[in-house]
Amino acid sequence: MPEIKNKDTKKSLSTIVTDLTRPLKNHYGLTPWMFFLLSVMGVGIASYIYQLQNGLAVTSMRDYVSWGLYISSFIFFIATALVGMLISAVLGLIGIKWITPIARIAEMIALGFVMWAGLIIIFDMGRPDRILNIFLHGRLQSPIVWDLTVVTTYVAISMLLYLLPLIPDMPFLKRVMSDQPKWKQTIYKLLSFGFVGRPEQYKLIKKLTRILAILIIPVALAIHTVTSWLFAMTPRIGWDSTIFGPYYVTGAFVAGGAAVVIAMFAFSVDFRLKKYITEYHFDKMGKLLVLLMLVYLYFNINEFMVPGYKMKAGEDHHILTLFTGAYAKMFWWVQLGGLIIPIILLLFKRMRKPIPSLIIAIAIIIGAFFKRFIITIPTLMHPHLPIQNVPAEFHTYWPSGVEWAVTMMAVSGAILIITILAKLFPVMPIWEIAHEEGISNEEINEFIENGDINDEEKTS
Amino acid sequence: MRYAMAIDTKKCVGCSDCVVACQTENNIPIGYSRDWITETVEGTYPGLHLQIRSERCNHCEDTPCVRTCPTGASHVIEGGIVKVTPEECIGCGSCIEACPYDARYVHPEGWVDKCTFCDHRINNGQDPACVSVCPTTCMYFGDLDDPNSEVSRITAVRRIKVLAAEAGTKPQIFYLV
């Protein structure tokens, strides 16, 4: 029985294992939560079938606004998914230590959202049955083809980046979860890929993770830059901008960072992991968000100050609609509620505590969603030529019930993926946390062989 | 061969006969149209200037819609006519966003539809449906490469303008002003 470190300052290996695997066994409250998610998805699936039967006419998308809520949510999902790359690749590669307990959470968010982002494109298509035409008749000149290519690549690399650091946790799970159903044990056995904790195996895992972390940076930058190019490659007022690539990437980091803060809070409370996700981590994430939001604010000023100062004919109408017109409420929520006020608040240490962070992060996420909405729709409402002699519903756009239901299905689908992953695998890498506590590989192997697992009462 | 159209805004009365003719000829679903009438008023009272135009796909020389199509369903045929192959179109909408003229729409069956200059009629030596029904004969259709065609002669002598020239797509519908 390896009594490793003084429990007052350090966590013992058995505590770590017990704490992190408890949520995998204790499913209190899971059934209503899953019921909720699945019923939202059920409504969404029914709505999508209705849309398939009756065509895109059941949405509010018409002649002028032909990219609506679906494409707005698509950008939002891609944006949120980008955080996996920021946290586990960029911060991981420059050797930042505090990301250890949240890297896997960020990767889970990335996986859940990017998978549904791919599906949302299909929801928006008039003829989803012809999706294979993109591969059969694909043209390299088309941004849609670029987009599909990078989305699938990002899904693949994110999946690997999630699964690879999971491998050294499998021996723990095999041992701790021996009382669990057989299918779970089969999964753990399959995913361990013969890992038994030899030093060279650890070395290999670390090396592979590093290679993937480097690989994912250009892919992730590409995925969001190409998404912005879907718009910027089009000669339209409001999209015809050269800064769209970096503008979207920083905006994505802000949205994803806020999503990570929300997930951190949810996991630390629901999974009782406050010992691992401490105020220190919220403090660090708050500071990171301030930095990212300042960069994003800088791009926002560029994007609106430059045309707003010139007020070129044609552009003036678009800018005024955003500043004072129909979209002013959303626009100023994005700029004030989603950027400026959170920046100011997060400068104070008190506001970087868990609960204030959570509230600020929710405000930022709402702002991020509005931002995607007002990128897509107002531009389509302001074509080069005046809109005339068309039915009244062509002049405005507000998503129909079908669109809301399908979008909500995508949101709950992404959360469902995150929930399933969090219920099957520990939300933090046990082995990396053990290494950080100074526990050596030999001690880990010893523990897996014949270690004692604390029971529920002792640790909680 | 370079098909083009010249439309005399001084003659057009905005009767929408071209719109109806197109809908009938090309079996357009109800509520949609490939061409439409636009009226713009410029200046301040009493110096007002009203312009009525029949608008449609400009069959541009530089085609952002064809460039952005992921499957090649949007393509250019002989004579510079921009067409969509319904069977190849996946309905992603990227051509609709790329078009500065909003000349395309999503057909209820999910694919994108647009003006074809009635190429089935041209091949039989007829004018497009809209041109042939115009009660004031304000539309001229023909081959720009042929200096004797009606459209070449009229664009040579009259003052012309194109729509959304700033988009840089080199449109081939000329408005006589």
Image: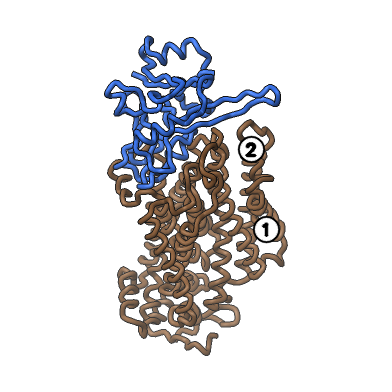
Chain colours: A brown, B blue
Residue drawn 66% across the image and 34% down it: A311
Q: Residues within 10 Å of mark 1 (few under 14, many from 20)?
A: many
**Tag of residue A342:** 1
Left or right of A436: which side holds A191? left
- Looking at this view, name the residue that lies furthest to the front: B135
Residue type indicated by callout 2: His
Looking at the image, which residue is at 48% across and 62% down?
A408
Q: Mark 2 points at which residue?
A: A317
Depicted A400 relative to depicted B85: above or below: below
Return the disc, 2 or 1, that comes first in the chain's sequence: 2
Q: Can residue A160 be seen in this view?
A: no
Discs 2, 1: same chain: yes
Q: Can the viewer see residue A122 in this picture? A: yes
Image coords of residue A353 (percent x, y): 66, 69
Quarter of the image with the C terminus of chain A is bottom right
Crowding around mark 2 (Cα neighbors within 10 Å: few <14, some 14 to 19, many 20+) is some
Q: Position of residue B53 (x, y in %)?
A: 51, 27
Q: Mark 1 lies on which chain?
A: A
Residue toward you, A439 or B146: B146
